[in-house]
Image: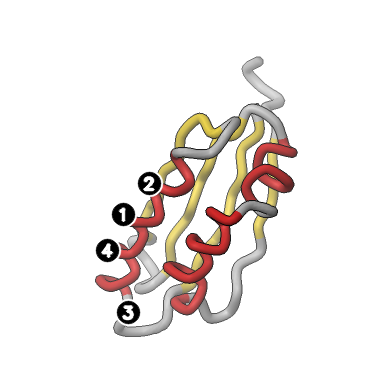
Amino acid sequence: MILEAAMLQVREGMEQKFEQAFIDASRIIASMEGYIDHELQSCLEAKGKYLLLVRWKELEDHTIGFRQSAEYEQWKKLLHHFYDPFPTVEHFTKVYPR
């Protein structure tokens, strides 16, 4: 399993619209090959800051299967205009416990 992590900074005043768009976008990512689950968390200390965690079976399920799909284009249209700055996405693998 691979954990995708992205710290998202949403433009001020757009948090509610972002959260609603994310619900719609969740249907897209959940339909992808290799998808396991995902969650979106809101930061308590910083308004507009979110943590997105997505679990994939394999790295390529995200980097190729999702990112190079028509569904990703829909995801981008729904969500990418909310971010400032654009987030860095990183991938992790579990060290402990296995």
Q: Which residue is mark 1?
A: 23
Q: Secondary structure at mark 2?
A: helix
Determine which of the numbered discs, if any, sits on residue 27 in the image.
2
Find the distance from the CA under tag 4 to the CA under tag 2: 12 Å
Which element type, helix, strand or loop, lies under badge 4?
helix
- Whichever of callouts 3 and 2 sits on the residue coming sooner in the sequence is 3
Comparing labels 4 and 2, the label whose residue is closer to the camera: 2
> Amino acid type of disc 4?
Gln
Q: Position of residue 52 (x, y in %)?
A: 48, 52
Q: Is residue 25 left or right of residue 32?
A: left
Give the amino acid at mark 1: Ile
Which dot marks residue 20? 4
Neighbourhood count class around disc 1 (C-alpha, 10 Å): few under 14, some 14–19, many 20 upward: few
Q: Which of these two is toward me, 31 or 26?
A: 31
Q: Quadrant of the C terminus?
A: top right
Q: Is residue 16 left or right of residue 62?
A: left
Of callouts 3 and 1, the N-terminal one: 3
